[in-house]
Image (cartoon, rainbow, N blue to C red):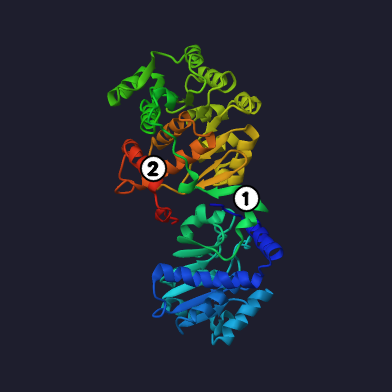
Amino acid sequence: MKVVSSKEMKEIEKVTIDEFGISEELLMERAGISVVQAIWHELGSLEDRNFLIICGSGNNGGDGYVTARDLLNYTEAVRVVSIDEPRSEVSKINSDRYIRHGGIIYKYSDIGLEKLSEMISSADIVIDAIFGTGLDRVIDEKKYIDTIGAINLYSRFTVSIDIPSGVATDTGKILDYAVQADMTVTFGYPKPCHVLFPGRELTGKLKIAKIGIPSQIHNILEFDKSLLTVENVHRPNRPRWSHKGDFGEVIVIGGSDKYIGAPVLSALSAQRCGSGITRLVVPEKSCQCAMSHDPSLICNGIDGKLSADYVNEFISSLPSNAVLLIGPGWSVENEEDKIKILEFAIGKVSNPVIIDADGINILAKTPHLKDLLREKSSSKTIILTPHPGEFSRLTGKPIKEIKQNYQEVKSFSQQYMVITSLKDATTIISDGETIYFNITGNTSLSKAGSGDILSGILAAFLSQHLRPIDAVKTAVYTFGLVGEMIPSEGMNSSFEVIFKLPEVLNKLDRFDENQLRMD
């Protein structure tokens, strides 16, 4: 499912109007009617409900006037408050049509905040049609601040048209004040603000309405952002006649005296997601931990100080398609040897490499390793899985600048020729060309060890011959679904998540897209 920015949406509308002969007026008509249909589908009969529609001066307000007029077909209990006079021609047309159909418009300048608050509190459903996708400035006018505050304070059920007013379309940030919607009806495609926090939280339940935008638009315009859905993910193929060698090897290089269990979580996750052979190159304490949980794991224990020569010689003995997962639980001690291991893995062998946790931290503070990324063969697969703090260190930019910054993820991936998965409540994935947003998951995954599990899942999918970008998408999406299957959200350990993996993978092909929550 494509995700489009405010600029892209304007281009879509322009092409729809200019190339396909569908007028702006018709698009607005269908948009307003689709809001009514969405409310009906969500809440049932409209006849016994009363509505208040609050309209701004732009086309979002125009959508509100169409919505109000169509609601008059179901009930007379429809009132409209205009914060400002309609500005665009098509909004004026629909304001007049609403009046001709018997509707009454109350001007905010006439009724004031007290009366508006009374109208909001007495309505069953308040429809927010104040600002649309074009808003790109901080809200500083008192009448808008007061109106948004009254909606949030008094509304029983709020429906926003296109986006919650006051949310920045392209970032999800609040422009000082924003409506908290229970449901948002957007048109054609979701926008970044619907999948990025805090906009995602303010959106409530998201409904995506088709308003007549031609499907051929994809042949004319290019879009680089998508929302991960069940249609975007690809389970590895496992023919019945296969043997363990067909499902690849995952090599987990990590662990330390401080973090004994992290590489074990990665290895166990890789096993349960289909890896044919899973090996650990870890300290002896981590080996003992691994064997106690599953003796089928193969462990190359390191007794004493980590030796780059030993690890690199081991890597040299592997088949070229063995997946190297470097960093879980590694710590930043013995940094010199770890730099040499990363140098070797990035620049000397053709194996696909996933760098996680302290592998990323060492990479971030070692300039020549980042240079190696740029200089490596374009056919070499490198996948980085940072959380925001690690990505901040990688880019040298403050967390507030890179958190949820999908363009930064794309730019970094393009610059270093890597695939980056920026882990967060909404995870952002990019291979330098396309951006993917993942919204599966919940706070059951907000646990120490979750990142280690995710990297193991990813390594397993990569070892089973999925394209690298498909392996990342499927791993992130699947991991999120596992979190949603925890019976009591957040009341779990990371270790418990591992045992849900086969269950989710078994059901993945049968997931109903309508079950995926957008709230």
Answer left or right for 121 relative to 209: left
> At which x and y percent is residue 10?
66, 60
Q: Residue at x 63, y 40 (%)?
A: 411
Answer left or right for 203 relative to 30: left
Q: Nearer the viewer, residue 117 or 516?
A: 516
Please tell me whether mark 1 sits on a helix, a strand or a loop: loop
> At which x and y percent is residue 514?
42, 56
Can you say whether 153 is above or below 428 in the image? Answer: below
Can you say whether 82 is above or below 282 in the image? Answer: below
Please tell me whether mark 2 sits on a helix, a strand or a loop: helix
> At which x and y percent is residue 380?
59, 27
Looking at the picture, which amino acid does disc 2 mark? Leu
Residue at the extreme front of the image, as rendered: 241
Give the image quarter of residue 174. Answer: bottom right
Residue identifier under label 2: 445
1 and 2 marks in contact (CB < 8 Å): no
